[in-house]
C-alpha cells in the first residue's frame, strides 16, 4: 500500500487545523509552542496568543511567585515586527506544591496555556505574512525529595500568520482550547466581599458570600502575589461562622515588618460562582485593625437578600416574571401560534361555558408543565457544572431542525394540504371530544417552545435572579413566567362577559386560518436562516430540500388518506407519508453538516459588520483598564428580540455617536453554545439574551444596563447621559446603575 497519499492528506489536515506554521519544541522536560486563537491577523485587531506548555509527568514549572523554593517563573522575550506589542502573561490559577519539604512552591503540571494579548498595528498590509518570534525561559523541577531542576533557557518559538483585510477565522485547533484556558484565569472581581484584618497570630481574611450562594466551601487557600508576604508552609485553617468564612494566615517568622495589604489569589475547589466556575479570585485589600461585624449595606448580600428573609425581593421578581410572561404574548415568536389559540376560542364560543373554561385551564397546564420541564433541565445542568440559559435549546442545530419541521407541517395543515395533526394546535379539533382538550394542552407546550427565542421586558431580571437562588425559588419564578404567558387565555375563556365580544364562527375563520399559516411559514424561514448561521449554507439548503420532501408526504396524506379513498389506499398513503417525513428527518439529523460542532465556514457564521468587535473577556479587560467607554451587545441569531433591536436601534446616527464619544462596541454572539459567554452573563445576573451593557469609562468600572427593547432614541439617551457626563467622575459605591428595571 502506498503511504504517500495518506501522508499528503495528513499534511493538509494539519495545515487546515493550524492555519499557520508552528512547530513544538521539546526541551527541559517541557514541550512548548506558540499558538493563536485565530488563523490570521487583521490590521488593528488584537490577537490572542498562548504559549502552550506540556510538562512531563512528575515535573512542574512555576507561577509568577515561585514560593519558598528557589524557582523561576516562565518568561517570554519577544521578537516582533515593527508596530506590534505583546502584553503581559495572563497567569492561570496555580497549584500549591508541598512535596519538597520544608519548601512550598506554586506552579503548574500537565498542560497549560499562558495567554498573551498581541496588539496589531492598523498599518499592517493585508496579503503579507506576519512572523511572531521569541524565546521562552522556565525552570522545570521534579516533584518529590529528589529536588532535580532543569532550566529551559531561551527556547525559541515562531508562529507565522497571514494578514487579511476582514475578520480572521477561528483556529480550528486552538480556539476552543484557548477559550477553555480563559476559564482557568482568576476572576478580577466577584460578588463576594473580601476583607482582611490583623489578629493575634497574624492575618485573617474575611470572605462574605453573595446571596443565594449555597455551596459549602470545604477549603480555601491564599496564594500571595509576592514572596515573603506570608508563611507559605503554615497551615491556613478555614472557619464558617454562619455568615462568612474566616481564613487565617501567618506572616513569615523572620519578617521584620508586616505588610499593609494582602494581595494575591484566593483559591477554592468549589468555584467562586458555583460548581464548575472559576476557582481563583484576585484579592488586593488593606489589612484593617479589626474584622467586619455585620454585612455591609453596599455588598451584594444586602442588595440581594435571601428570598426567605421577607424583604420583598422575591415578590418583586415574581411580579417581574409574571409581567414578562404576559408581555411575551406580544413578541413576534409567540404571536402567530397564540393567534391560532384565539381562533380556537372563537370555535368554542358556542360551547358550554364550563367546557370553554376547561380548555383555558388545560392550555395553562400545558404552558406550566413546559416551563417546569425547562426549569428542571436548566437547574440540573447547572448543578452538573454546565453554563446554560434561556433559549439554550436553540443553540442545538438538531432542535432547530425538529422545530422547523413541526412548524412547517402545522403550516401546511392550516393551508388545508392535510388534516392530520391539526388538533395539536387547537384548530379544527372536535368541539366536544377529548381531542379538543389534547389540542389545548399541546397548544400550551407549543407556545412555550416557540417563546424561548424571545426575551420580553422584565424577564431578564427575573431569570437572572434565579442564578443566585435555591432550586425551589427558580421553579417558582418559572411558574410565574408560565402563568403570565397563559393568563390572557385563562381570563378570556373564564369570563362569559368577555366571550360576548368574540366574533361568532363563520366563513372568515378559514381565511384567517390560512393567513396564520403564512405567519408560521415565516417562522420556518427564520429557523432555516438560524440553522444557516450555525452550520453554514449547505445545512440550510439541506433542510430546505428535506422540507420539500416532507411537504410531498403531507400532500400524499391530504389527497389519498381521506375517508373517500379505499382503506388500502389510505393505509398505503399514511405509510408512504411516514417514511418520507420520518425518514427524511432522521437522515438530515444524522448528516455530517448538522452533527459537526461549530458548522462549516461556507455560511454567514462570521460577523461581517466591521463596526462591532468580537467580544472576549481579555478584550473587555484591556479596554476597561485603559479607561475607555465600552458598549457590549450580548446577542444570538436565534433571538428575535436581538435581531429586531439590531435592525431598529443601531442606525447610522447611533453609530456615528459611538465614534464621536470614542465608545468601543463589542458583540458577544451566543448563537452557538459558549460556556465563556454564559459565565459572563451569569456574572451580570443574566442567563439569556439580549443584554446591553454600557461602561461609561474611567477607573471604577461601573456599568449601566440598558432596556431589552431598544430604539435609536433610547440608545442615544444612554450614550449622552452616561458617557458624556459620567466619564469625568462617578460618585457612590454602587457598581450597577439602572434608570429603570429593564
Image: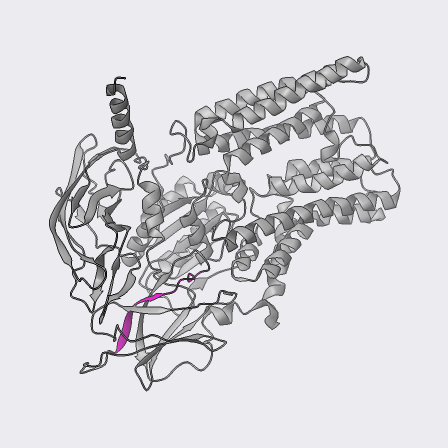
Image side of residue 143 versus residue 386, left or right: left
Residue at the far front in the pictured view: 146
Image side of residue 169 versus residue 79, left or right: right
Residue at the far right in the pictured view: 352
Q: Where is residue 585 shown, x and y percent of the image?
A: 57, 26
Image side of residue 594 versus residue 309, left or right: left
Q: Where is residue 491 shown, x and y percent of the image?
A: 77, 49
Q: Residue at x 28, y 70 (%)?
A: 263
Quadrant in which the N terminus is drawn: top left
Image side of residue 421 versus residue 296, left or right: right
Question: Could one spot residue 705 in this view of the protein?
Answer: no
Residue 287 sits in which quadrant? bottom left
541 and 92: which one is in front?
Answer: 92
Chosen colour scheme: one colour
Residue at the far bottom in the pictured view: 200
Q: Where is residue 121 shown, x and y percent of the image?
A: 19, 42
**Residue 263 on the magenta span:** yes
Tell me which segment is drawn in magenta: 260-274
Q: Where is residue 393 shown, x and y percent of the image?
A: 54, 41
Q: Residue at x 43, y 55 (%)?
A: 276
485 and 401: which one is in front?
Answer: 401
Residue 723 sits in which quadrant? bottom left
Question: Could one spot residue 15 in this view of the protein?
Answer: yes
Residue 229 sits in which quadrant? bottom left
Q: Residue at x 60, y 48 (%)?
A: 374
**Residue 35 on the magenta span:** no
Q: Residue at x 70, y 48 (%)?
A: 486
Say above or below: 634 vs 569: below
Amino acid at each position: 500500500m502506498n503511504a504517500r497519499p495518506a501522508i499528503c492528506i495528513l499534511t493538509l489536515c494539519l495545515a487546515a487545523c493550524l492555519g499557520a506554521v508552528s512547530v513544538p519544541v521539546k526541551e527541559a522536560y517541557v514541550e512548548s509552542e506558540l499558538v493563536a486563537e485565530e488563523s490570521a491577523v487583521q490590521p488593528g485587531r488584537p490577537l490572542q496568543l498562548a504559549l502552550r506548555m506540556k510538562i512531563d509527568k512528575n515535573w512542574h514549572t512555576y507561577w509568577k511567585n515561585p514560593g519558598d523554593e528557589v524557582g523561576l517563573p516562565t518568561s517570554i522575550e519577544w521578537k516582533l515586527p515593527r508596530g506590534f506589542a505583546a502584553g503581559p502573561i495572563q497567569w492561570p490559577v496555580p497549584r500549591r506544591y508541598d512535596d519538597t519539604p520544608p519548601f512550598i512552591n506554586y506552579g503548574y503540571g500537565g498542560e497549560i496555556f499562558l495567554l498573551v494579548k498581541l496588539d496589531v498595528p492598523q498599518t499592517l498590509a493585508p496579503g503579507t505574512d506576519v512572523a511572531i518570534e521569541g524565546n521562552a525561559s522556565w525552570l522545570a523541577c521534579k516533584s518529590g525529595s529528589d529536588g532535580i531542576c532543569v532550566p529551559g533557557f531561551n527556547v525559541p518559538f515562531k508562529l507565522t500568520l497571514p494578514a487579511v483585510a476582514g475578520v480572521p477565522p477561528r483556529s480550528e485547533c486552538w480556539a476552543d482550547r484557548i477559550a477553555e484556558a480563559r476559564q482557568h484565569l482568576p476572576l478580577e472581581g466577584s460578588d463576594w466581599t473580601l476583607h482582611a484584618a490583623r489578629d493575634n497570630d497574624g492575618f485573617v481574611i474575611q470572605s462574605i458570600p453573595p446571596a443565594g450562594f449555597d455551596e459549602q466551601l470545604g477549603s480555601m487557600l491564599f496564594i500571595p502575589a509576592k514572596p515573603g508576604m506570608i508563611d507559605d508552609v503554615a497551615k491556613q485553617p478555614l472557619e464558617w461562622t454562619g455568615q462568612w468564612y474566616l481564613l487565617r494566615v501567618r506572616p513569615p517568622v523572620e519578617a521584620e515588618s508586616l505588610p499593609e495589604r494582602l494581595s494575591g489569589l484566593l483559591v477554592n475547589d468549589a468555584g467562586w460562582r458555583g460548581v464548575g466556575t472559576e476557582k481563583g479570585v484576585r484579592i488586593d485589600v488593606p489589612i484593617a485593625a479589626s474584622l467586619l461585624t455585620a454585612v455591609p449595606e453596599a455588598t451584594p448580600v444586602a442588595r440581594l437578600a435571601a428570598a426567605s428573609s421577607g424583604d420583598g425581593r422575591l415578590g418583586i421578581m415574581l411580579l417581574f416574571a409574571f409581567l414578562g410572561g404576559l408581555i411575551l404574548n406580544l413578541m413576534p415568536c409567540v404571536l402567530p401560534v397564540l393567534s391560532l389559540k384565539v381562533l380556537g376560542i372563537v370555535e368554542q364560543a358556542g360551547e358550554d361555558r364550563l367546557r370553554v373554561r376547561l380548555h383555558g385551564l388545560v392550555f395553562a397546564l400545558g404552558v406550566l408543565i413546559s416551563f417546569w420541564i425547562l426549569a428542571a433541565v436548566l437547574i440540573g445542568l447547572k448543578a452538573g457544572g454546565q453554563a446554560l440559559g434561556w433559549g439554550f435549546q436553540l443553540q442545538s442545530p438538531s432542535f432547530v431542525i425538529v422545530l422547523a419541521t413541526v412548524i412547517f407541517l402545522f403550516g401546511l395543515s392550516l393551508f388545508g394540504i392535510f388534516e392530520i395533526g391539526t388538533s395539536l394546535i387547537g384548530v379544527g379539533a372536535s368541539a366536544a371530544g377529548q381531542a379538543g382538550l389534547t389540542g389545548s394542552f399541546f397548544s400550551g407546550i407549543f407556545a412555550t417552545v416557540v417563546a424561548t427565542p424571545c426575551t420580553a421586558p422584565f424577564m431578564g431580571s427575573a431569570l437572572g435572579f434565579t442564578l443566585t437562588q435555591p432550586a425551589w425559588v427558580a421553579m417558582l419564578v418559572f411558574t410565574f413566567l408560565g402563568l403570565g404567558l397563559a393568563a390572557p387565555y385563562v381570563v378570556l375563556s373564564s369570563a362569559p362577559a368577555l366571550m360576548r365580544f368574540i366574533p361568532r364562527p363563520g366563513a372568515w375563520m378559514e381565511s384567517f386560518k390560512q393567513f396564520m399559516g403564512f405567519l408560521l411559514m415565516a417562522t420556518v424561514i427564520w429557523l432555516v436562516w438560524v440553522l444557516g448561521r450555525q452550520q453554514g449554507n449547505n445545512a440550510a439548503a439541506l433542510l430546505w430540500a428535506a422540507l420539500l420532501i416532507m411537504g410531498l408526504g403531507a400532500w400524499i396524506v391530504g389527497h389519498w388518506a381521506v375517508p373517500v379513498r379505499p382503506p388500502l389506499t389510505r393505509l398505503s398513503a399514511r405509510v408512504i407519508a411516514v417514511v418520507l417525513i420520518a425518514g427524511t428527518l432522521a437522515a438530515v439529523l444524522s448528516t455530517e453538516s448538522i452533527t459537526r460542532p461549530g458548522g462549516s465556514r461556507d455560511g454567514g457564521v462570521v460577523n461581517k459588520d466591521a463596526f462591532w468587535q468580537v467580544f472576549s473577556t481579555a478584550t473587555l479587560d484591556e479596554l476597561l483598564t485603559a479607561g475607555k467607554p465600552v458598549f457590549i451587545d450580548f446577542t444570538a441569531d436565534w433571538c428575535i428580540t436581538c435581531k429586531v433591536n439590531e435592525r431598529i436601534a443601531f442606525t447610522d446616527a447611533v453609530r456615528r455617536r459611538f465614534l464621536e464619544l470614542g465608545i468601543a462596541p463589542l458583540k458577544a454572539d451566543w448563537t452557538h453554545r459558549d460556556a465563556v459567554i454564559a459565565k459572563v452573563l451569569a456574572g451580570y445576573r443574566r442567563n439569556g439574551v439580549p443584554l446591553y451593557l454600557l461602561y461609561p469609562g474611567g477607573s471604577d468600572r461601573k456599568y449601566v444596563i440598558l432596556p431589552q427593547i431598544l430604539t435609536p432614541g433610547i440608545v442615544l439617551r444612554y450614550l449622552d447621559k452616561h458617557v458624556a457626563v459620567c466619564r469625568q467622575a462617578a460618585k457612590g459605591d454602587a457598581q450597577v446603575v439602572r434608570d429603570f428595571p429593564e
